[in-house]
Image: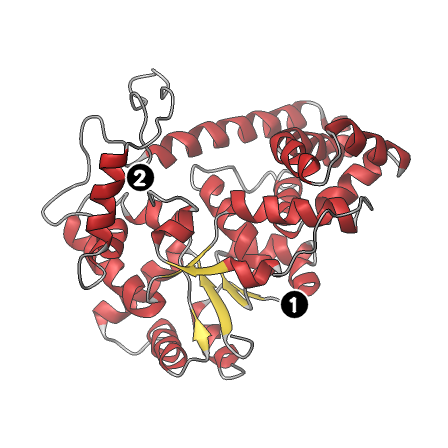
Amino acid sequence: MASTKIVYLDQNKWIDLLRAEKSGEDSPSLAAGAALRQAVAAGRAVVPLSAGHYLETWHRSNWESRHALARLMRDISQFSTLAPIQSVQRWEMDLALVDYLGFAANQMVSETIRDRILGRGVDHAFASPTGRLRLVESVAARGVPEREELEPSSEFMDLLERVRSLPNDAYEWWSLAGNENDSMIHDDWETRGQHRIGDSYAEQERALSAHLVENPEKKGKLDYFIATQDLIGLSEDIHEAAKSVGITDLDVLGRLVEMGGPEAGKGFLHSMPSVAVRYDARRLKHRNAQWPWQQHDHIDLASLSVALPYADIVVTERQWAHLFKVAKLDRRFETRVISRLGDLPQYLTDC
């Protein structure tokens, strides 16, 4: 894999590829798709899917449209997948406690994170033995929150294992494409939970943006506020990672205070690549009132926070490409970040 480039496409870029191939007319996007297929076939590139691709593809209620997009993704990705953000930031946390905060590791890490980023299939994309499926007492509905998550029964796992053993990657195909002649909208089966989560996330970010507009003097403390939010959000990971090296949360906090308090906290976040991407993207977007927060921003950041540090080429929408370059994250991670599919072939020739 050392000579194979990881190429990540945002969901909207997959859709652009599909449109270009359907039209059949000469276009930069059609040329990009052909170049991408050639690079994959030659083993020069791998184009993994993220959990976000699985979630967003099922949002297409028209099954023919959904299957057309899924076929394109299947053919080019060959079901290669990226590990999800929750796994990656935990791996990074383990390293940050040692490399940034200077705590002694209990054991050597034999694999780099990049070695663990790529895998195959939906189970890897969601870091779950049940793939994209989660069992809960009841799904969220009409303002009633989702109830407690349930452990899958042995009978359910046996059934899932039988489905996995079906020929022609039937399990993988269904996980990405869903059923034929089916909108994938059913009672007691929430297939659009990301919309609910994304709406809530965007609402919180818009409230912060409005607060900054009303209180412009607070923009000077925005970076520290977002850093504090992120550290609080990482508290469970910090607890688990600290425990794994024989220390406590208070040891971590004490070390950050010794190293400079707030500035050390920002440094700690930046020492974890996926966390750094999310942190910098949020703080920079909040500084530009022309870019309102949208529902899809939540899943975009979750996916791009993994792709940007660990892929070789990232093709994303103009907004994110601009923010990543302003933060110089493309230089830090030596990742080619572009927003136009038409630019892709020239970089694939280097593969």
Quadrant housing residue 121 = bottom left
Q: Position of residue 254 (x, y in %)?
A: 84, 30
Vertical placement of residue 217 versus 25, above or below? above
Vertical placement of residue 250 versus 323, above or below? above
Report how far apart the C-alphas of labels 2 and 1 lie in the structure.
Answer: 35 Å
Name the residue: 52% across, 78% down: 347
Judge left or right: residue 134 versus residue 155: right
Pick the residue in front: 267 or 63. Answer: 267
- Give the residue pinned by disc 2: 133
Name the residue: 48% across, 48% down: 84
Vertical placement of residue 118 versus 182, above or below? below
Quadrant housing residue 130 = top left
Query: How many numbered marks have been drawn onto this rendered protein structure?
Result: 2
Name the residue: 25% across, 48% down: 161
Frontmost of labels 2 and 1 is 2
Q: Position of residue 89 (x, y in %)?
A: 60, 45
Judge left or right: residue 304 versus residue 169: right
Pick the residue in front: 201 or 115. Answer: 115
Q: SS class of the residue under badge 1?
A: loop
Q: Position of residue 45 (x, y in %)?
A: 45, 75
- Give the residue pinned by disc 1: 334
Evaluate if marks 2 and 1 touch, with contact meaning CB atoms under 8 Å apart.
no
Quadrant housing residue 47 = bottom left
Kind of residue at disc 1: Glu
